[in-house]
Image (spheres, rainbow, N blue to C red):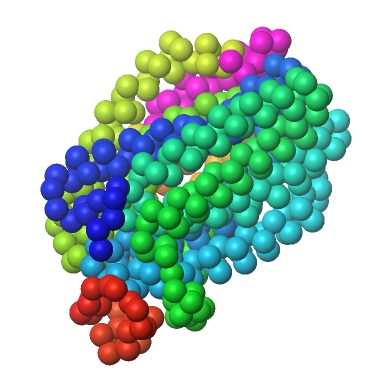
């Protein structure tokens, strides 16, 4: 089946495939960060620093609820990439058909939980009473966008698993531009404040989801599913949860630890809260090259492990590490000499916040290589189906963030600087754990295409549905 925009990563230069694939992802991730960046810039400049703190304190909680559904999308993408690499088109289609049941059900549940739990979670985070109502309003409003996020992430993960990282970018750019326009309109023209930026975000998320689905249906033959193919299959739904839930729990555990760290930050008052919000927003941008590279490595390793080419997976990993090192070195002078200018994009009326945030960026930039060594091994092992690693990775990051925060911030000479010291130390230690797992090599034996026929919807011995125009199912090892 010939598909436009798809890429077979089992042949050709690994570095070229990974970079070519990662570039559209990077652009897309940067535009996606506009959701939060524009929220913060608009709120910080046109509503006030208290409102900025209210939006910022919801960052880790929103990440928690979003990750519960987006983790499933990543797991689905892994399954598709492995079957696509193994040229098993029947199970590619079966995975796509059942992914929508998984994503919609999970995101609806998460949305309801987030809406109900919002005030209780924020009180646990010791959010000051002065900004608590605005924080609850922002968090509850954004919960309505979780279904849109899950749907867009699911379709995008499938398209990327097929080697197409460009198409999701186009729709994400569109929704990001809409988000910018709506942010300015709702805040400046209608005076909706915090509610306005949250509303702009969820409208933009649904635009990206709907447009991506329409494109996939009309342009990608795999999405033109028959009624028979749309019937739920317990085995593939179970497989989606087996891979997706550990990834979701990994992100969720990290989010919980970030929430605890946010609670520590909140104990130091609004100035430190605002500084932490600004550094978090800037570091979200810094992380995008690592995130994009990891996503590219996930698809690359998924296709190649599905094709049984372990040596090619290793070669791609080595070349990705070199890319991380180069970017990490480039960012050092950027943060040392340009960090304050970046901070001033968010805050103009509080010199103490600017001073703290700029100094914090200089320190955390020293640990960027450790951050990259979390993302690249994680991307590889996710692509290979090493679900156990997701839990190990999540536990190690949570343990570091919680223990370091309690130790460093309690030292009088360190005080609130311990928040950023915790961040850097967590990156370095977790990066070492990820590298250890990679060299242990358990990921080499996790390919779905090496499992028993009974674990698949369509196996060699299964009867093909009528009208199926796919190639012969993969011979399983």
Prevailing SS of the magenta stretch: helix
Where's the C terminus, which quadrant?
bottom left
219 relative position to 9: left or right = right
Residue at 68% across, 63% down = 109
Residue at 49% across, 71% down = 98
Displayed quadrant of residue 15: top left
Which stretch is magenta?
Answer: 345-368
Residue 210: x and y in percent read 56, 50
The foreground one among 398 and 72 is: 72
Residue 119 appears in the picture as rendered: yes
The foreground one among 294 and 31 is: 31
Residue at 49% across, 34% down = 173
Residue 190: x and y in percent read 80, 25
Q: Confirm whether the magenta stretch covers residue 463.
A: no
187 vs 58: above or below: above
The foreground one among 464 and 356 is: 464
Residue 260: x and y in percent read 65, 45
Residue at 60% across, 32% down = 178
Residue 153 appears in the picture as rendered: no
């Amino acid at each position: 089946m010939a598909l436009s925009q798809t890429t077979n990563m089992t042949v050709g230069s690994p570095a070229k495939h990974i970079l070519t694939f990662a570039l559209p992802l990077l652009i897309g991730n940067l535009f996606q960060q506009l959701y939060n960046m524009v929220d913060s810039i608009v709120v910080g400049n046109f509503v006030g620093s208290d409102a900025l703190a209210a939006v910022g304190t919801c960052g880790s909680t929103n990440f928690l609820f979003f990750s519960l559904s987006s983790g499933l999308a990543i797991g689905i993408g892994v399954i598709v990439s492995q079957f696509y690499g193994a040229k098993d088109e029947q199970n590619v289609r079966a995975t796509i058909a059942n992914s929508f049941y998984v994503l919609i059900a999970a995101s609806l549940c998460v949305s309801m939980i987030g809406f109900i739990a919002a005030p209780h979670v924020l009180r646990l985070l010791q959010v000051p009473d002065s900004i608590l109502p605005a924080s609850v309003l922002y968090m509850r409003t954004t919960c309505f966008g979780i279904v849109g996020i899950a749907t867009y992430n699911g379709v995008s993960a499938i398209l990327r698993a097929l080697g197409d990282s460009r198409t999701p970018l186009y729709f994400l750019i569109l929704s990001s531009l809409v988000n910018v326009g709506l942010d300015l309109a709702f805040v400046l023209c209608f005076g909706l404040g915090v509610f306005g930026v949250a509303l702009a975000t969820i409208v933009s998320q649904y635009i990206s989801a709907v447009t991506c689905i329409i494109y996939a249906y009309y342009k990608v033959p795999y999405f033109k599913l028959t009624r028979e193919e749309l019937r739920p299959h317990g085995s593939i739904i179970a497989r989606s949860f087996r891979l997706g839930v550990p990834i979701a729990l990994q992100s969720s555990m990290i989010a919980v630890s970030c929430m605890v760290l946010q609670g520590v930050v909140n104990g130091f008052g609004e100035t430190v809260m605002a500084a932490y919000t600004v550094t978090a927003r800037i570091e979200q941008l810094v992380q995008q090259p690592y995130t994009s590279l990891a996503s590219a490595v996930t698809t690359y390793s998924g296709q190649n492990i599905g094709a049984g080419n372990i040596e090619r997976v290793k070669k791609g990993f080595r070349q990705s590490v070199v890319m991380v090192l180069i970017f990490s070195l480039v960012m050092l002078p950027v943060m040392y000499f340009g960090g304050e200018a970046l901070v001033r994009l968010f805050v103009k009326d509080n010199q103490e916040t600017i001073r703290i945030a700029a100094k914090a960026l200089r320190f955390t930039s020293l640990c960027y290589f450790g951050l990259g060594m979390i993302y690249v091994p994680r991307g590889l092992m996710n692509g290979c189906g090493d679900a156990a690693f997701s839990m190990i990775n999540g536990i190690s990051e949570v343990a570091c963030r919680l223990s370091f925060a309690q130790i460093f911030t309690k030292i009088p000479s360190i005080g609130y600087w311990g928040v950023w010291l915790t961040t850097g130390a967590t990156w370095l230690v977790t990066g070492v754990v990820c590298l250890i797992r990679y060299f242990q090599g358990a990921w080499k034996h996790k390919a779905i295409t090496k499992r028993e026929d009974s674990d698949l919807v369509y196996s060699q011995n299964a009867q093909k549905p009528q009208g199926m125009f796919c190639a012969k199912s993969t011979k399983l090892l």
